[in-house]
Each structure stands twice: as C-alpha cells, then as structure tokens.
Image (cartoon, rainbow, N blue to C red):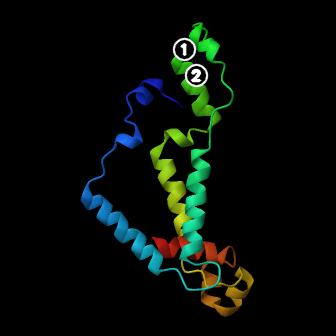
Amino acid sequence: KFDYKVAKNTQASSSVVIPAIVVSQLRELVTSIASMYHDNPFHNFEHACHVTMAVDKFLRRIVAPDLDVDQLRNGKKSRGELASHLHDYTHGINSDPISLLAIVFSALIHDVDHRGVSNAQLVKEEERMGLLYNNTSVAEQNSLDVSW
C-alpha cells in the first residue's frame, strides 16, 4: 500500500551518492556476469546489454494516466490521493527502488550461460541439466542458478 508520508520524505534517486567501493563492487559483479555469457550468435552479453537497456527505457516510460490537475488545484484531491493514484496506476514499480533493481538485474542475467540452442536441444545434449530442472525452462532456470 502506498504511504504518501514515506514517499514525501524519500530522497530522489538522482541525489543519491553511491560510495566508490559500491561502484567498484557493482563493476566486479557485472564483469563476472559478462564472463558467464558464451560467445554465441545471439544469446551473448551484447544481447543482455541490449535487453537491459531496453528494460530500463521501458521502466522510465511508465507514466501516470491523464490526471486532472484541476482537482488538485481546487482541493478536491490531496497530493497524497493523487500520489497514491499514480502509485496504484504504475503498480508501484517506479516508487520502489528494490523492484527497479530486481527488474534491471533480471534483464542482465536472463541468458547467462546460454548455450545457443533451444531448450529441447539442450535437454538432449545435457541430460543431467534436463533432469535437474525437470525438462522445464532449462536454459532459463540454469541462467538464474549460475548467476547466483
């Protein structure tokens, strides 16, 4: 549930200063993830970067419906009510930095260790992997496991 008081006191993400050690750790993490991508024609790190950038752009385009600003000006709706409406309309995605991080991170890791073949072919070539994931979304589940 949206809490206007909390949102009002939340710091804008553009004003957050990330310590150098954290930036360094993030670079190491991304470098590690990049190294787990194979050099195949499509499901490679370049593809992961494109997907990650596209997801980031889509997230930035989640906007409010046409809100009646006159209702705010005339006092019919409070800022809190309008902010709550915006939060509900966007499913709270843009007001939750942890959700944003999870979505962008998921895009980055979505094809880690992808062998460049379909799941059906992967199950034939890697029987143990098929058994491990019950022959269901084998490449995808493997990507998640390897990334962690």
Q: Categorize mark 2 by other alpha carbons within 10 Å: few (<14), some (14-19), many (20+).
A: some
Give the farthest residue toward the right. Answer: 120
- Identity, as a three-letter code, of the amino acid under mark 2: Leu
Q: Work out whether 30 lies above or below 57.
A: below
Give the farthest residue toward the bottom. Answer: 125
Residue 97 appears at what percent x and percent y? 46, 45
Q: Work out whether 87 lies above or below 100.
A: above
| Quarter of the figure with the N terminus | top right
Q: In this rendering, does residue 8 appear at all?
A: yes
- Identity, as a three-letter code, of the amino acid under mark 1: Ser
- Is the Cβ of the residue at disc 2 closer than 8 Å to that at disc 1? yes
Give the side of residue 4 with respect to residue 127, left or right.
left
Depth check, front residue: 142 or 52: 52
Residue 66 appears at what percent x and percent y? 69, 27
Give the side of residue 22 with respect to residue 126, left or right.
left
Identify which residue is drawn at 66% across, 23% down.
Answer: 67
Give the side of residue 138 with respect to residue 106, left or right.
right
Q: In this rendering, does residue 111 appear at all?
A: no
Residue 52 appears at what percent x and percent y? 55, 62
Q: Categorize mark 1 by other alpha carbons within 10 Å: few (<14), some (14-19), many (20+).
A: few
Q: Quadrant of residue 56?
A: bottom right
Q: Which residue is mark 2?
A: 82
| Quarter of the figure with the C terminus | bottom left
- Helix, strand or loop for disc 1: loop
Q: Which residue is mark 1?
A: 78
- Helix, strand or loop for disc 2: helix
Residue 62 appears at what percent x and percent y? 62, 42
Mark 2 vs mark 1, CA separation in Å: 6 Å
